[in-house]
Image (cartoon, coloured by chain):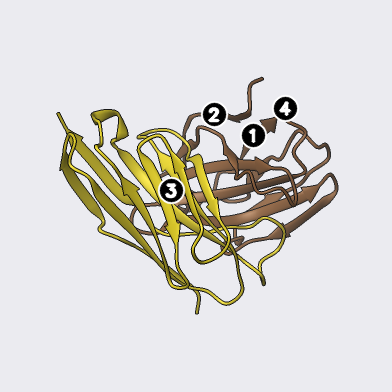
Chain colours: A yellow, B brown
Amino acid sequence: EDQVTQSPEALRLQEGESSSLNCSYTVSGLRGLFWYRQDPGKGPEFLFTLYSAGEEKEKERLKATLTKKESFLHITAPKPEDSATYLCAVRRSRSGANNLFFGTGTRLTVIP
Amino acid sequence: NAGVTQTPKFQVLKTGQSMTLQCAQDMNHEYMSWYRQDPGMGLRLIHYSVGAGITDQGEVPNGYNVSRSTTEDFPLRLLSAAPSQTSVYFCASSYLGVDYGYTFGSGTRLTVV
């Protein structure tokens, strides 16, 4: 059975304290791993897509990496505005079209 | 450019009532989908469409119907609401075969009493 597990469930950081969020997956036929950011009361916002082990992508203070079993979202010197829930999702070869399978997210709080 | 527009934002239904959640996008995306988000369970796919006249079931389709008569609109119908359908519903769209990721609507919070 396909699984996407995100850890930790919640993370509190001081402003400027770098850390990483983890997304481990057990999926047959991975066709892409996606990261989204979700603010309270809003829909998720697309951040990155990763396709193959060793791939990395960056956006401002965020860097996403991918191995054969997991992905990390590294947050460097976070600011309070980085507080949000970060969602990981996979596209599987057996799924139709563009369908994604989501993890349950990591809720990040950055304290000033 | 409005993106993905969902209406209503909030709704309370009584058990057994029916209703339609509206979703419209103005980006000419071929792919549209409906997800529900429940605490501790993540986003789960209800139904999806790859173009006008084409729809298919996702992981949790029971109790819901969809249709896609135009590229822009993808309404979700609850046939006979049940308390288990209390959730936040998101509509998402994207181009097919181009991995820019979904554009999500702002969600509809539905409570069934």
Quick check: A10 left or right of B92?
Answer: left
C-beta proximity under 8 Å, tags 2 and 4: no
Q: How would you rate the neighbour count of disc 2 (Cα within 10 Å): few for under 14, some for 14-19, many for 20 or more? A: some
Residue B8 got which mark? Answer: 2
Graded by Cα atoms within 10 Å as few (under 14), some (14 to 19) or many (20 or more), the crowding at tag 1 reads some
Name the image quarter holding residue B4. Answer: top right
Please tell me which residue lies in front, A12 or B111. A12
Q: What residue type is labelled 1?
A: Gln
Asked if labels 2 and 3 share a chain, the reply is yes
Tell me which numbered mark, 2 or 1, is placed earlier along the sequence.
Answer: 2
Chain of the residue under label 2 = B
Distance between mark 2 and mark 4 Cα atoms: 18 Å
Q: Which of marks 3 and 4 is in front?
A: 4
Q: Residue B26 carries which label?
A: 4
Marks 2 & 4 on one chain: yes
Residue B35: give x, y in percent of width and height. Answer: 55, 50
- Residue B22's disc is 1
The residue depicted at 24 percent of the width and 37 percent of the height is A77
Q: How crowded is mark 4: few (under 14 residues within 10 Å), some or many (20 or more)?
A: some
Q: In this rendering, which labeled residue sits more in front, label 1 or label 4?
A: 4
Quickly name the residue at label 3: B86
Sequence-first disc among 2 and 3: 2
Q: Which amino acid does label 2 sit on?
A: Pro
Residue type, numbered disc 3:
Thr
Mark 3 → mark 1, Cα distance in angstroms: 17 Å
Chain to which the residue tagged by mark 3 belongs: B
In this view, B27 is above or below B32 = above
